[in-house]
Image (cartoon, rainbow, N blue to C red):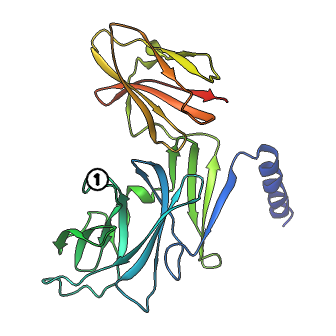
């Protein structure tokens, strides 16, 4: 018993000393009437969290709520699932497996993958149906729910690495977002094994009016792209570069004060990446 009490005492002490994992935000009743679930996705406007609210008393209806990376409200969409000829087993209950804005069509609205018992439907936020796939489901669909990449509990964002946990039977209406001190290996971009040779140098940093970005490209790379992202992952500026010059001058007067990410890549391969600060 003494050993158990000692372990219970040391655990909060260790947490207090290091303080590395911090609870960033708590969502309440954001997915189901009996279970809160928060997912993440990357839209053209940056990284987002999203949750689905459904009511067992009104099958075929739900509310999709999308939040910005700072947890402020981005958009809310009411979903109504239409009946489809040929689908004889769906009863109206559904799950949303994926949310995007430029994947299933090219307009500016949200679109989402809805999973029913008898089909997979791709729908636009205006209610139009882009696809009805009868008796077809994502390969990792199981037991009436979707288990896809956007449900992975730990993921990198421009404002740090996050972890999402869902409450148990006691906290079943809540989902928790934690901020982590480290980061996952970059799985969204292939980083050159020689990236250290092509580091970005920029100055002045912090910048107020202009910032000069000095870069170097491998001898076998003729054209590359320099992207500037805000901390929500939204692309703010894009430049095409080549080996003719080794620097570009960026006007930062139109940028808000804050931290930005500068990335150089070519052929889906990240050559170098760094951050800079804009002050006003």
**Residue located at (25% from left, 85% from top):** 90
Q: Quadrant of residue 243?
A: top left
Q: Is residue 184 left or right of residue 6?
A: left
> x%, y% of residue 100?
35, 56
> x%, y% of residue 183?
55, 40
* Residue 74 visible to an observer of this rendering: yes
Q: Is residue 125 left or right of residue 22?
A: left
Q: Secondary structure at mark 1?
A: loop
Which one is nearer the viewer's eye here, 84 or 156?
84
> x%, y% of residue 166?
56, 67
Q: Quadrant of residue 216?
A: top left
Q: Residues within 10 Å of mark 1 (few under 14, many from 20)?
A: few
**Residue located at (80% from left, 63% from top):** 4
State the residue lying farthest toward the left.
Answer: 86
Q: Is residue 204 above or below residue 110?
A: above
Q: Is residue 240 above or below residue 56?
A: above
User: Label 1: which residue?
Assistant: 103
Q: Which image quarter holds the C terminus?
A: top right
Q: Is residue 272 left or right of residue 124?
A: right
């Amino acid at each position: 018993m003494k050993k158990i009490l000692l372990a219970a005492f040391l655990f909060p002490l260790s947490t207090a000393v290091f303080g590395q994992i911090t609870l960033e935000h708590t969502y309440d009743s954001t997915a189901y009437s009996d279970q809160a679930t928060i997912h993440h996705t990357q839209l053209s406007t940056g990284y987002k969290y999203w949750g689905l609210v459904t009511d067992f008393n009104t099958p075929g209806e739900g509310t999709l709520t999308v939040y910005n990376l700072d947890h402020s409200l981005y958009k809310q969409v009411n979903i109504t699932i239409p009946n489809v000829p040929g689908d004889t087993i769906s009863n109206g209950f559904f799950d949303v497996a994926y949310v995007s804005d430029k994947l299933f069509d090219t307009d500016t609205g949200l679109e989402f993958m809805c999973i029913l018992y008898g089909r997979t439907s791709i729908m636009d936020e205006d209610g139009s149906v882009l696809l009805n796939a009868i008796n077809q489901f994502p390969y990792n669909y199981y037991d009436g729910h979707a288990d896809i990449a956007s449900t992975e509990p730990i993921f990198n964002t421009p404002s740090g690495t996050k972890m999402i946990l869902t409450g148990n039977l006691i906290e079943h209406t809540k989902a928790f977002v934690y901020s982590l001190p480290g980061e996952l290996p970059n799985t969204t971009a292939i980083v050159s094994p020689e990236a250290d040779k092509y580091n970005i140098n920029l100055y002045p940093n912090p910048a107020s009016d202009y910032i000069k970005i000095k870069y170097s490209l491998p001898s076998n790379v003729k054209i590359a792209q320099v992207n500037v992202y805000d901390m929500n992952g939204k692309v703010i500026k894009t430049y095409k570069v080549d080996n003719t010059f080794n620097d570009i001058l960026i006007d930062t007067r139109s940028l808000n004060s804050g931290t930005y990410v500068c990335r150089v890549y070519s052929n889906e391969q990240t050559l170098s990446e760094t951050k800079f600060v804009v002050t006003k």
